[in-house]
Image (cartoon, grey):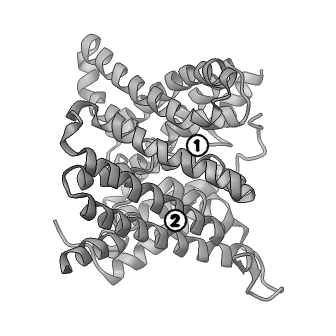
Amino acid sequence: MRYISILIAAIFAHNIALRYFLGWCPLVSQSKKLSSAWGMGVAVTLVMTVTSAVNWPVYNYLLVPYGLEYLQYIAFIIVIASTVQVLEMVIERFFPSLYTTMGVFLPLITVNCAILGVSLFMILRDYTLLTGIVYALGSGIGWSVAIVSLASIREKLRFADVPKPLQGPGITMLIAGIMAFAFLGFSGMVGIK
Amino acid sequence: MSNMKDIYTAGVWEDNPVFRQMLGLCITLAITNKVVNGVTMGVAVFFVLTASAFIVSLLGESVPRRVRIPVYMLVIATFVTLVYMFLKAFFMPLSQALGAYVGLIITNCIILGRLESFSSDNSPWDSIVDAAGVATGFALALIAMSVVRELLGFGTLFGVQVLGSGWTQWVSMILAPGGFLVLGLLIWVQRSISPVEEG
């Protein structure tokens, strides 16, 4: 039950993109087309889940016993960069068709702050390994929900008469603001702890 | 020396990292509900960006292309760890207010972008000037955002009551939606003053 509520909370009430503002650089640049939004969403969800599953033992079994918690940033970023690299090679080797659609998004993910952010939040909130993984999965899905809905709205906007200086990023931010208002409605529904 | 000045001002206004390149948005949106946070984050990013630009420009060609991103990330992460420990030691309340977002400077794409596109093949001196310009532009964007949000949201600036006590606080300005709306409107203003060239 606890896992389900964490999952739901991470997707809606505590949406990583609309509540904690994480991963916005790719959200703006990759939300022009619905198809690339899907690709990015799947890639982020995958990397997020895998990296937090690795980062949790790294933090609790490697850093904490030796009092090296202050090295967490460096450790996490090494884990994330190498996980992305390994995933890229594995997908390229075994799923070439998937690689052609998703491959371009993978290098972008190393600098997606949502990935590092989820690992840091997991540590800050003292999650257990399993809760951490569920939380990461939920956050990935939540991020995908945000980028896919944003891309759908932006595709419709192509036919709208937006003032020139507001076109592109400007209007995207205003849409995001309205989406964030909508997602505020979920708060209080389920807690994240 | 006009070249130096051009490099600097481009980063501040015409290529402003937030309003033009849409980079570093997570931090911009997340911590700008108080001016103090905006200023602190601006200074922190200024330090990390100039320091890592200097180191990366010294490394130059000696880093193989394939592993350069992880190497850059390590350089950045080292400086961010310094900032984190410094804040924790001397400014505990600020450190708590910024929380995980200090760590997220590592994945701030402004920094990696500058290292990759400029510092990796320019002289250390040029790189520092470029980094300083971009960091100044970022800090100004943070301050602009946080002034609007703190003023409307709390009626204060730097925690000092500016608007009269009869001011109705716009709570949504402090919450997530306010960040997006203010950023959208500021982008509108910036691009109206100097329009984006077609291309």
Q: Quadrant of residue A159?
A: bottom left
Q: With respect to residue A66, does B51 lie above or below?
A: below
Which residue shows up at 69% across the image and 20% down it?
A65
- The mark total stands at 2
Q: Chain of mark 2?
A: B
Whole-angstrom CA distance, mark 1 to mark 2, is 23 Å
Q: Secondary structure at mark 1?
A: loop
From the viewer's side, name the closer residue of A66 and B8: A66
Q: Report whether residue B125 is seen.
A: yes
Q: With respect to residue A123, does B6 lie above or below?
A: below
Which residue shows up at 57% across the image and 34% down it?
A71
A38 with respect to B149 (left or right): left
Percent across and percent down for residue B158 are 69, 76
The residue singled out by tag 2 in the image is B42
Residue type at mark 2: give it: Gly
From the viewer's side, name the closer residue of A65 and A160: A65
Which residue shows up at 57% across the image and 27% down it?
A137
* Residue at the left extreme, as displayed: B199
Residue type at mark 1: give it: Ile
The residue singled out by tag 1 in the image is A16
Cβ atoms under marks 1 and 2 closer than 8 Å = no
Label drawn at residue B91: none
Tag 1: Cα neighbours inside 10 Å, few (<14), some, or many (≥20)?
Answer: many
From the viewer's side, name the closer residue of B73 and B123: B123
Q: Quadrant of residue A60?
A: top right
Q: Report whether residue A18 is seen.
A: no
Percent across and percent down for residue B81 are 55, 44
Closest to the camera, between mark 1 and mark 2, is: 2
Q: Secondary structure at mark 2?
A: helix
Q: With respect to residue B7, does B23 lie above or below?
A: above
Is the same chain shared between marks 1 and 2?
no
Q: Chain of mark 1?
A: A
